[in-house]
Amino acid sequence: MTLLSVNLNKIAVLRNSRGDDEPSITQAAQTCIDAGCGGITVHPRPDQRHVRPDDVRALAAMLRGRVEYNIEGNPFAPPRGSYPGLLALAREVRPTQVTLVPDSDGQITSDHGFDLTRDIERLRPLVEELLAIGSRVSLFVDAGTRDFSAAVAIGVQRIEIYTGPYAHAFAAGNAHEQLALCTDTAKRAQQAGLAVNAGHDLNQANLGTFKAAIPGLAEVSIGHALIGEALYEGLTTTVRNYVQILR
């Protein structure tokens, strides 16, 4: 079964809007686990607009040995204030998986993947360090990426396909082309020996079609849509709905 990893960034956004401790990100994680998710994802950024370093640490303490813990982020973003940098956080909490994403402060959300020709040598030492601390390494890539030999050569174990364009095309009623790109990228990655994750703008409406098109899909990371839907149906019910789709 494809693992559901719930991204809790939006819980932190809501909490930060009042500058207090509620809603609790650890309580939200516990609710998602109780409802059947197999993992928790966070994406700390240097500007700390949502998840903060202390959230990363608190979640690590409660999740260890229970479900997978996936930390996303830009490994090239330097430390800033109390944000020590992605690799420093990973060394400290040793998550199950680190998903490397080429985002920046100017982006509202992640909106593109790595260029595996241009970026691979910069990524090599970072991947080596993450593997050395026992974390699985996944790279965020665009649908349509075709050659994964360089990623395999530096030790990457998974890719995460950026599914934003697919989700937008699905909502417009014309997802065939974007889904075909995702399917081809997944197939080529699997043939190269990589497992395939996916994430961004996946929701209850478009997830079933996506999963059916990609045999062996290892994991989906879903946050924005899931938390939005939970406002109407409740977090427990919504997580259970996603788990059922993935079954």
Image (cartoon, helix red, strand yellow):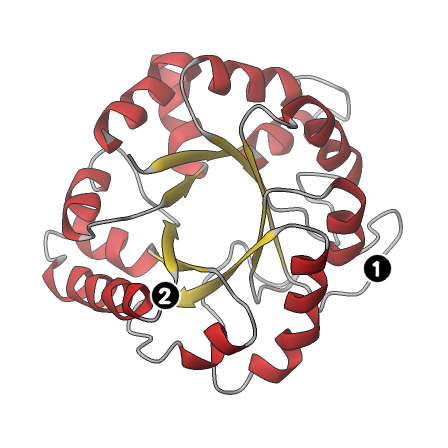
Q: Give the side of residue 190 with respect to residue 116, left or right.
A: left
Q: Mark 1 points at which residue?
A: 79
SS state under label 1: loop
The image quadrant that residue 222 belongs to is top left
Q: Seen from this angle, which residue lies furthest bottom?
A: 118
Q: Nearer the viewer, residue 194 or 172?
A: 194
Q: Is residue 244 above or below residue 191?
A: above
- Percent coordinates x, y for residue 47 in the rendering: 74, 52
Residue depicted at x 32% and y 43%: 202
SS state under label 2: loop
Q: Which mark is residue 193?
A: 2
**Of labels 2 and 1, the one closer to you:** 2
The image quadrant that residue 92 belongs to is top right
Q: Which of 84 and 166 is in front in this view?
A: 84
- Percent coordinates x, y for residue 238 in the rendering: 34, 20
Say whether disc 2 or disc 1 marks the residue closer to the N-terminus.
1
- The amino acid type, in three-letter code, at marker 1 is Pro
- Percent coordinates x, y for residue 10 in the rendering: 55, 34
